[in-house]
Image (tube, grey):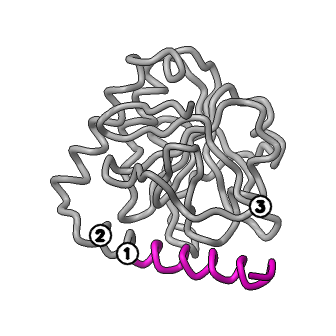
Amino acid sequence: MTGDAASGTVRGAKTQLRATLLRRRRERSDADRAAAGAALAAHVGADPLLARPRRVAAYHAMPGEPPTDELIAALLATGREVVVPVVDDAGLDWVAVVPGATLVRSSLGIPEPDGPRLGADALAVCDLVLVPALAADHGGHRLGRGAGYYDRALPRATAPLVAVVFADELLPEVPTESHDVPVQAVLTPAGLFRVP
């Protein structure tokens, strides 16, 4: 198989898996999502990878994603600085989270804070980066939504990258391409899985 054909096959597999995962996320109950958000927050002090960082890049979850509001609140409650992305024409910029600040839903449906922009390089001075994903596998491969915002931003990071998914989205294998940035751990409501 030629490189173009192989790449097309991987892209097709990603598209198919994304559709399946998005359908399953739509089928989750509000109670399941709420329980997942509480469980994610409970892991903040339970593992050194999550307990030590002083500055964490996180994100406000889109509808259907594992909820991150309680996770962000738990990080802030333990004295961490938390920055979250805002999408602009150039990609991802970052804003510090201020407890109680108003969030505005972006054109992509993402809740974003209003505040001073820290620049794309703010990711380089974070001690931990929590990354949204539709799935991740035991090898550290992450399947995103396909827009590439994080794959373009993550090379700036020097800290461990942690994909956040529902427990049943930690899979044995996800299709990957050369531009996909791997993660070092996967956080699920069931716990933190470190990539060997």
Q: Which residue has dot 3 on it?
A: 179
Q: Majority secondary structure of the magenta segment?
A: helix
Q: How many marks?
A: 3
Q: CA distance from mark 3 to mark 1?
A: 22 Å
Characterize the local packing of mark 2: few (<14), some (14-19) or many (20 or more) Cα atoms within 10 angstroms: few
Please state which of residues 165 and 141 is positioned toward the viewer in this rendering.
141
For the magenta stretch, what is the residue range? Answer: 1-19
Residue 10 lies in the magenta-colored region: yes
Please state which of residues 185 and 49 is positioned toward the viewer in this rendering.
185
Q: Amino acid at mark 1?
A: Thr
Cβ atoms under marks 1 and 2 closer than 8 Å? yes
Please state which of residues 127 and 94 is positioned toward the viewer in this rendering.
127
Q: Amino acid at mark 2?
A: Arg
Q: CA distance from mark 3 to mark 2?
A: 26 Å
Percent x, y of residue 28: 22, 64
Q: Give the secondary structure at mark 3.
A: loop
Label of residue 20 in the image: 1
Q: Residue at x 50, y 59 (%)?
A: 111
Q: Which residue has dot 2 on it?
A: 24
